[in-house]
Image (cartoon, rainbow, N blue to C red):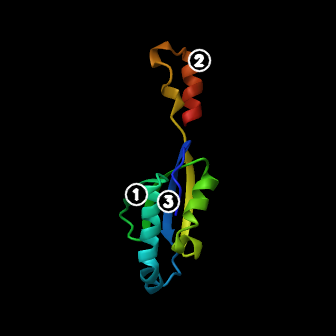
């Protein structure tokens, strides 16, 4: 059982079924995977889950102290722990460039911000 806790960042998880995986193996473990996902959701770790146009891909948004902490939570899921899924984790941070009104930015500063974003 996952314990609820304070969180500090969002982590985007792009989760794909590895091409070599037998679909029957996935079907066998899917009830446990869904139960584990539900436990992460009720603990406040898994905040959002999305299907995609690719049937072998799901997207999770997790809240954790870091990407490695999010990975540790996901490793509790049987398909992830069994190496049947490829998981890419991306730490998300607030977009800080909106912290100052655009009209207050000097031309030099605005150019620097534009370079940082692109």
**Upstream in the sequence, badge 1 or badge 3?**
3
Residue located 51% across and 36% down the image: 94
Q: Secondary structure at mark 1?
A: strand
**Residue at mark 2 to residue at mark 1: CA–CA distance:** 40 Å
**Upstream in the sequence, badge 3 or badge 2?**
3
- 23 left or right of 115 in image: left
Q: Secondary structure at mark 3?
A: strand
Q: Which x, y percent locates residue 68? A: 64, 55
Q: Are marks 2 and 1 in contact (CB under 8 Å)?
A: no
Q: Which residue is mark 2?
A: 108
Packing grade of label 1 (10 A; few <14, some 14-19, many >=20) is some
Say which of marks 3 and 2 sits in front. 3
- Quarter of the image with the C terminus is top right
- Number of marks: 3
Q: Which x, y percent locates residue 82? A: 58, 76
**Residue at mark 1 to residue at mark 3: CA–CA distance:** 10 Å
Packing grade of label 3 (10 A; few <14, some 14-19, many >=20) is some
Q: Which residue is mark 3?
A: 14
Position of residue 42 relative to residue 97, above or below, is below
Quarter holding residue 111: top right
Residue located 54% across and 21% down the image: 110
Residue in the foreground of this view, choosing between 20 and 3: 3
**Upstream in the sequence, badge 2 or badge 1?**
1
């Amino acid at each position: 059982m996952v314990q609820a806790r304070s969180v500090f960042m969002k982590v985007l998880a792009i989760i794909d079924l590895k091409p070599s995986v037998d679909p029957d193996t996935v079907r066998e473990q899917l009830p446990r995977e869904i139960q584990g996902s539900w436990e992460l959701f009720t603990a406040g770790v898994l905040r959002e889950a999305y299907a995609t146009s690719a049937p072998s891909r799901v997207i999770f948004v997790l809240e954790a102290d870091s990407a490695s902490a999010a990975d540790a939570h996901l490793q509790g899921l049987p398909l992830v722990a069994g190496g049947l899924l490829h998981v890419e984790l991306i730490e998300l941070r607030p977009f800080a460039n909106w912290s100052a009104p655009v009209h207050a930015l000097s031309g030099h500063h605005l150019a620097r911000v534009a370079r940082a974003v692109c």
